[in-house]
Amino acid sequence: MPKTLMQSVVTQLKKERERLEDELHRVTAALTAFGKVYLGGRQPKRAPTARKKRTLSAAGRKRIVAAQKARWAKIRAAEKATKKK
């Protein structure tokens, strides 16, 4: 009895699933071997916990703003001096 198109497709899909399962087993084995060699059998490090967000006081922010303004003023003064020459 000839196979229908649907039966052929199902058969091919089953073969592909078996192939993929075999490939997945090989990849898993490779990862396991790699992990044992390069991690020395240690457990992977845990993800770092979230740090507490730092806050800046108003006075500290004002000092930073003043220092930046002074830097820009110095740069502008140097530019004006070079243009006048």
Image: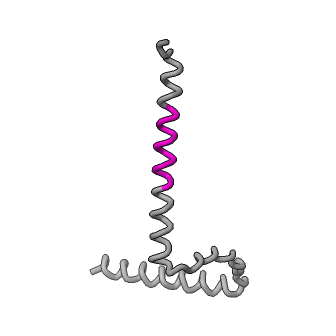
| Principal secondary structure, stretch drawn in magenta | helix
> In the rendering, at what x and y percent does residue 37 appear?
45, 76
Identity of the residue drawn at 63% across and 74% down: 47
> Is 14 situated above or below 68?
above
The quadrant in which residue 66 appears is bottom right
**Coloring scheme of the render?**
one colour
Q: Nearer the viewer, residue 55 or 37?
A: 37
The quadrant in which residue 44 appears is bottom right
Check if residue 79 falls in the magenta segment: no
> In the rendering, at what x and y percent does residue 7 appear?
52, 21
Task: Look at the image and give the residue range highlighted in magenta.
Answer: 13-25
> Is 70 situated above or below 34?
below
Q: Nearer the viewer, residue 43 or 72?
A: 43
> In the rendering, at what x and y percent does residue 58 appear?
72, 83
Identity of the residue drawn at 50% across and 52% down: 24
Left or right for 82, reference 22 = left
> Is 16 situated above or below 43?
above
> In the rendering, at what x and y percent does residue 39 appear?
50, 78
Check if residue 14 falls in the magenta segment: yes
